[in-house]
Amino acid sequence: MHYVYILKSEKDGSYYKGITQNLKIRIQNHNNGSAEYSSSKKPYKLVWYCAFPKKEDALRFEKYLKHGSGHAFAKKHLI
């Protein structure tokens, strides 16, 4: 399975959207600082995730959430 997820920074309230095959380990990576891009805003709390059997579908949905109307969709329906 491939997971698209949204984390909320407990430091500044910002959101991080990503994709992974192992959600538990990926959240640990964000919170221990080994995920470089998000390390300055740790700690994080998982606020939403969805599982996709196909990687291509997960990548497509993650891209949607990170661009254009996907921001509004996430804010209105997911977080």
Image: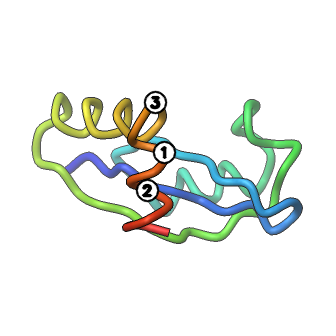
Image coordinates of residue 16 in percent, x first then y, are 61, 48
Q: Answer with left or right where residue 9 lies relative to residue 18.
A: right
The extreme left residue here reads 53
Disc number placed over residue 67 in the picture, else none: 3
In this rendering, the answer to whether 25 lies above or below 67 is: below
Tag 1 and tag 3, C-beta contact below 8 Å: yes
In the image shown, does 21 or 48 lie closer to the viewer?
48
Identify the residue under disc 2: 74
The three-letter amino acid code for the residue at tag 2 is Ala
Image coordinates of residue 39 in percent, x first then y, are 81, 42
- Distance CA(mark 1)–CA(mark 3): 6 Å
Question: Which residue is drawn at the image coordinates 78% and 53% (left, top)?
Answer: 32
Q: Is disc 1 surrounded by few (<14), some (14 to 19) or many (20+) residues within 10 Å?
A: few
Question: Which residue is drawn at the image coordinates 20% and 50% (left, top)?
Answer: 1
Disc 2, SS: helix
In the image shown, does 10 or 43 lie closer to the viewer?
10
Question: Which residue is drawn at the image coordinates 50% and 69% (left, top)?
Answer: 79
In this rendering, the answer to whether 72 lies above or below 47 is: above
Image coordinates of residue 22 in percent, x first then y, are 39, 52
Tag 2 and tag 3, C-beta contact below 8 Å: no
- Distance CA(mark 2)–CA(mark 1): 5 Å
The three-letter amino acid code for the residue at tag 1 is His
Tag 2 and tag 1, C-beta contact below 8 Å: yes
Q: Answer with left or right where residue 16 lies relative to residue 13.
A: left
Identify the residue under disc 1: 71
Quadrant of the rendered image containing residue 50:
bottom left
Question: Which residue is drawn at the image coordinates 25% and 30% (left, top)?
Answer: 60
Q: Is disc 3 surrounded by few (<14), some (14 to 19) or many (20+) residues within 10 Å?
A: few
- Distance CA(mark 2)–CA(mark 3): 11 Å
